[in-house]
Amino acid sequence: MVKFQNITKAYPPSTMALDNVSFEVEPKEFVCLVGKSGAGKTTLLKLLMAEEKPTGGRIFFDNQDVQKIKPKHLPEFRRKIGAVFQDYRLLSSKTAYENIAYAMEVIGASDEEIVRDVAEVLDIVGLTGKAHNFPAQLSGGERQRVAIARALIHRPEIILADEPTGNLDPYHTFDIIRLLLKINEFGTTIILSTHNREIINSLCKRTITLHEGKIIRDEKIGRFIL
Amino acid sequence: MFVSIKRIFRSGWQGLTRDGGMIVANIFIMVMAISVITSLFLFKDISQFLISSIQEKVDVSVYFKYEAAEEDVLKVKEAVAEIPEVKEVNYVSKEEALKNFTEKYGDDLVLMESLAEIGTNPFLASLGIKAFQAQQYEAVVSLLEGPQFDPLIEKIDYYERKPVIESIYNLTSNFNKAGIVFSIILVLAAVLVAFNAVRLSIYNSREEIKIQKLVGASNWFVRGPFLAQGVICGFFAAIFCLLLFALLTWGLNSKAELLFPGLGLFTFFTGNFWMIFLIQLLTGILLGIISSLTAVRRYLKV
C-alpha cells in the first residue's frame, strides 16, 4: 500500500533528516515509528502527505508515485489520507462539529451525509456533548479526539498519527491509542509515530525504529529499544 | 456546485462574524478607500462645474463703426456664427446698448446728464463672441480683421483681454491636470492601505490555510471563504459610504450653494445616485476580491 524506496531528505546547509530509508506498509497494518526527536519520523509522514519533497528516492501510495502527483490533484490524493498531529491543528474559528464536518465538505458530501456521519463519529470519539465547543474550549485530550474524528470521518485508506499523544497525560494517551486500535480493527491502515515507550511495549505491533535518519530496526512485534 | 458556493459563503460569513474586530477593521479601511474614490468622482464634476462657470464668463466683443448698417453687422454675425470654433454670438444693437447703459447707470445723474448733453446715441453696435476654447479666439479675430469685415469694424477688445483669457484657461487646464495626478496618487494610497489590511488579516490565517490544504481542500475551497469575506466587507463598506455621502451632501448643500451659486451638491448626488452606488459597490467588491486573491495565493503552496 505504501512503499518508501531509498528515501533521502536533506535540509540545507547540512542536516540529513532521512538517509536511504526503505520500507513497505501493507493494507490494514498498524505500524509504529519510533525514534528520538529529530530522528526523521515527522519528515517521513510529511513526505507521504506530499507536504514536502524528498531529496532522493521514491514514495508510492497505492502504486502511485507521490512525487509525480500534479498540484491540482493533490487535494484528491490527500483525501485518501487522514492526518493527526501532536499540536492537533484544528481550525480555531470552527466548532468541534464544524472541524469534523469540514473534512466531509471538501469531498463534496451532501448535508444529510454530513449530519449523519459527524454525529456517528462524535459518538465514537465520545464527544457528542461537546460538538458545539470551539477548540479553545476543549481539553488537550478532547482536541485530539476531534482531530482523530476529522481524520477518520471521510473513511481514508490510511491514518497518519504524528505523535498524537505528545501533549497528553497518561490517561488521555491510552484513550487515544485505544481509539486508533479500534479504527484499525475497522480496516484502516495506521502509521503511528511516537517516542512513548509504554505505548510501544503495550501495543505489540510492528515497530520501525529510526535513528539519525536511518532505520535501525524493523520488527513484527516491536519493543521500545533506542 | 451550488452546495459548494453555499458552504463557501457560510464559512466566509462565520469567519467574519466570529472575529468581530476583523470585520469592523476591514470595513472601516474599505470605507476610507471608497470614500476617497467617491470624493474624487464628486470633486471631478464639481470642479468641472466651477471651471465651466468661469469659462462661461469669458468672451470677446467686436464693436462696429457708427455708420455701419445693421444689415451688414447681421451679415458679419451670420458669418461668425458659421465658424465651427464659435460657441455663441450675441448681437447688441446701438439702441440695446443705450438701453442697457441707462438701465445700469440710470441712477447716476452725472452720467445721464452727460449722455443728454451729447444729444445722440453714442453707443456702437457690437457682437459678443464666445469660443469653445481660448486658443480659438485668435482664429476668430484674424477672420474679422480680414479685408471682408475690417472696414466695418471699429474695435476688437481681444488684445486687451487676451492675457486674462489665456491665464484663466491655463489655470483651469492646470487645475484639471493637477486634479488627475492628485486623484491617481490618492486612489493608489487608498487601494494600498485597504490591500494591506486584507493581507494582514489573511496572514493571521496562514496556519489555518495550511491545515485546510492538508485535510484535502482544493485551492478554490480554501480561497472561497476569503473571497466571500472580501465581497461581504466590500458590500457593507459601499452601503455605509452611500449613507455617509448622502448625509454629507445633504448637510453641506446649503453652504455649498452660498459659496458657488447654482451648485446643488445634494441634487448632484441624487441625480448620479446609481452611478455613485455602482462606483462604490464595484470599488468595495473588487478591492475585497483582488486583495484576498493575491494575499491567499502565497499560502496555498502546501
Image (cartoon, coloured by chain):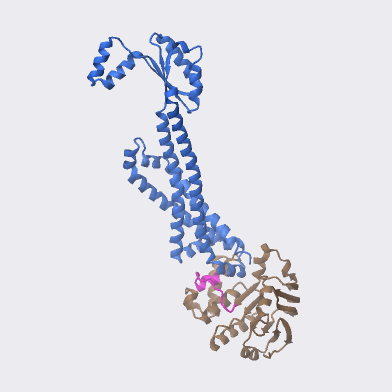
Chain colours: A brown, B blue
Q: Is residue B68 left or right of residue B83?
A: left
> Residue A177 magenta-drawn?
no
Q: Which segment did they paint magenta?
A: A85-101
Q: Nearer the viewer, residue B182 or B120?
A: B120
- Left or right: residue A93 versus residue A107 is left
Q: Is residue B57 above or below residue A32?
A: above
Residue nearest the observer in this picture, A181 or B255:
B255
The residue sitting at 43% across, 41% down in the picture is: B272
- Locate residue B186, reporting x and y percent: 48, 49
Image quarter in which the N terminus of chain B is found: bottom right
Q: Name the residue located 54 percent from the left edge and 55 percent from the top edge.
A: B289
Pick the front one: A30 or B266: B266
User: Can you give x and y, in whole percent of width and height, for residue A182 in the image?
Assistant: 61, 83
In which quarter of the view is residue A65 placed? bottom right
Residue ID at (57%, 61%): B296
User: What residue is at 42 percent from the left and 43 percent from the top?
Assistant: B273
Instruction: Tell me if I can see residue B298 in this picture.
Output: yes
The number of numbered discs placed on residues in the rendered structure image is 0
In the depicted structure, whether residue B174 falls above or below residue A192 = above
Residue B281 x, y percent position in the rendering: 47, 50
Quarter of the picture holding the C terminus of chain B: bottom right
Look at the image and tell me whether residue A113 can be seen: no
Q: Residue A105: give x, y in percent of width and height.
A: 57, 66
- Is residue A97 one of those drawn in magenta? yes
Quadrant of the image occupied by residue B61: top left
**Above or below for B80 versus B40:** above
